[in-house]
Amino acid sequence: MSIRLQLLIVALTTLILPWAGCQYARELEDALRVSQENALESTADTIALALSAQPARVFRAPEDSRPYVEEQGDLYVFALRSPPLLDGYREDWGVAADPKRLPSQDGYGARLQVGSTDRYLFLYVEVDDPHFAPEPANPDLEKDRFDRIDVTLEQPDGSLESYFFATGAPGLIEAQRTVIQSDGTARVASEPRIQAYWLETAGGYHLEARVPLALGGSRLWIEARDGSGRKAGFAADSAEGGRLFMATSGLGELLATFIRAGTRVTVVDTNGLKLGTAGALGSADLEDDAGGTWYRRFVTVDTSSWPVQGSLPDRMTGKSIAAALAGRPAAEWLRASGGPQDLKLLAAAPIAVDGRTRGAVVLEQSGDQLLDLRDRALAHLFDLTLLATALAVVFAFSLATFISVRIGRLRSAADSAVGNDGRIRLQMPESGSADEIGALARAFERLLARLDEHARYLRTLGGKLSHELRTPLTIVRSSLDNLESEGVRGDQHGYLIRAREGTVRLQSILAALGAASRVEESIQQAERVSFDLAELLRRAVAGYRDAFPEARFVLEAPADGCLLRGAPELIAQMLDKLIENAVDFTPPGGTITVKLTRAGSNYELSVENDGPSIPDAMLGRLFESLFEHRQGSDDKPHFGLGLYIVRLIAEFHDGSALAANRSDGSGAIFTVILPLI
């Protein structure tokens, strides 16, 4: 693992600070949540106590405690914001609920919705009856069969008044009722105070009617009939049904005096039906908070298990509301339909009249208010911890990069400290620094200095040995000459011959060592010039044919010029060593091929010879100094310097040398790669 990565990991451990901040934020949010629950529950209880003191302003009929039973004809009246236009459509009512289906024993389809304003009661009826039976000119309700809607209103004095809606042609109509004349006969009379609009549709008709509240009481029955006698709805003889459950006039204005912005208050009766609503849920403007939204995902409590608030236009349900209607204040957090983070706090408190629970006050607040309080408390702290972490990571990463660059420079210098020519560069980067990297660089310099001293000693060792051994060797040779001139016995003559051969071999070794030293010195002092490499090979091969007649030489070189910038005398010396090596291993009559080709941006000079293959283990060591590997023996001394000199000359020309075997095993190939001009 690199130092940069290690320091980066160390710097990332500072993320424990934001993590601790997240834990603290969650604990703070829990505390704020409980505090908000208690506060909202106390507010709901206070409002409920205030409303309990004036039940007439809350409930239309405080004495009626019977439950709401929709199956018996009880109707919930939606509070309309403004009087709708009588046109047979209900889109301008602003009610999200669909009309309720009226019961029918013969499958007659009809649906009803009731709304009200301060002065009027509005009825909307949809009837599925594609066969329209118009009203006759003088209808007799007991005998004539036609499409109509019967409406029975309970008068304020408790009496019942029946009306019906029918028409011969769609459009704006008036309600009609049966009037008993003085002679006892019945006739149908219009009621201009009750207006309606009859709208024909492809599957039936719609009726939208407007009834003054002054004409009715607290109960209403409605029934749709067609020309064949089918009907749907509730007749006036339903003793238990027909009650109108509607919002209390002025209750909304009264409730508005108890709440502040961002809170919605609703009063429900014992059935959970809405009697009045005021206020609206607010959402804290968190987008303007620089840090209030982007990090919320790290501190938000998991709310996926919280209950989802039901959305019903006419009533409110839920655990806390049920508890309040049972006489116990309660509060709970809910998830709104917007998503798991769209939270809402709901608190409910019972409204008691004469010791009996008659309804409940329900307060709602958006969870954004809690998030706003939490964000204001933590935004600055969280931003500071994240900024500190970011700065620590940037600083550690920068420091690691700086250290890595310094170590990389030192590593590169160490890799290139020994050049291709064997020279050692003693200067190391960062050696002037006072830290551990500087100490390491200075240690490298001391090591390289000792290595350079030893290398200089080895480079001059051959010359020193040649100079020091020349005189003793001359003395030995002269002594052998004198001994031979004095005469020796026959059994001693063999020893004399072996001694003379040993001196000759020592003389050859000293000559080779001197030659190697001279080659190294000449390489350092050689001057580079431009010359034609192909022409040099042609002249050299012509000379080799005369010098080594026992071998056959083949030259393959481009006909045009092959310019090379280098030392031609060194190239010739390198070629001599390659040819001498090839001649040593080529059998009599064998072929030595000298080939020059262009390969990309390089020249490839190769010498191929017939003969034995080179062992694979030795291919990489042939160009080492004093390395010798020959199978069999001959009468010439070999010291492993020829191919070493080839490598030195190739590296002087920024090239390389390598050895390989022919693919068929019939010989070896020595290749020198030299760069083009």
Image: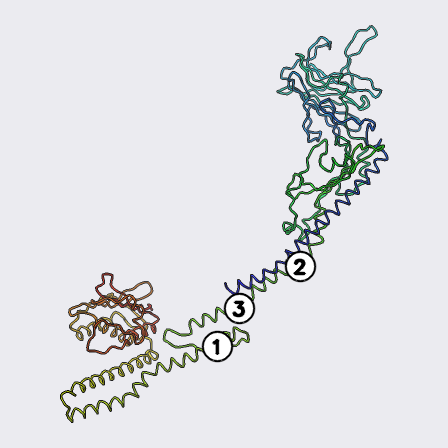
Q: Amino acid at mark 2?
A: Leu
Quick check: can you spot residue 138?
no
Closer to us: 389 or 616: 616
Residue 426, quarter of the rendered image:
bottom left
Q: Give the class, few, some or many, for how many residues have Cα within 10 Å of label 1's Cα (few <14, many ≥20).
A: some
To which quarter of the image does residue 145 belong? Answer: top right
Label 1 vs 2, first from the N-terminus = 2
Which of the two discs, 1 and 3, sits closer to the camera?
1
Mark earlier in primary sequence (3, 2): 2
CA separation in Å, label 1 and label 3: 18 Å
Residue at label 2?
Answer: 384
Mark 3 touches mark 2? (CB < 8 Å): no
Q: Please tell me whether mark 1 sits on a helix, a strand or a loop.
A: helix
Label 2: how many Cα within 10 Å (few below 14, some 14–19, many 20+): few
Q: Amino acid at mark 1?
A: Ala
Rendered residue at 74%/36% (across/down): 321
Residue placed furthest toward the left: 490
Visible residue check, residue 590: yes
Q: Is residue 240 above or below residue 497?
A: above
Marker disc for residue 403? 3
Foreground mark, 1 or 2? 1
Mark 3 to mark 2: distance in Å? 28 Å
Amino acid residing under circle 3: Ile
Is 11 or 126 nearer to us in this picture? 11
Query: In the rendered image, which quarter is residue 141 located in?
Result: top right
Per the image, label 3 sits on a secondary structure element best described as helix
**Residue 616 spot, x, y in % from top left:** 28, 65
Which numbered disc, 1 or 3, marks the residue that appears first in the sequence?
Answer: 3
Q: CA distance from mark 1 to mark 2?
A: 44 Å
Identify residue for label 1: 443
**Image coordinates for residue 309, horizontal then vertical, percent:** 68, 37
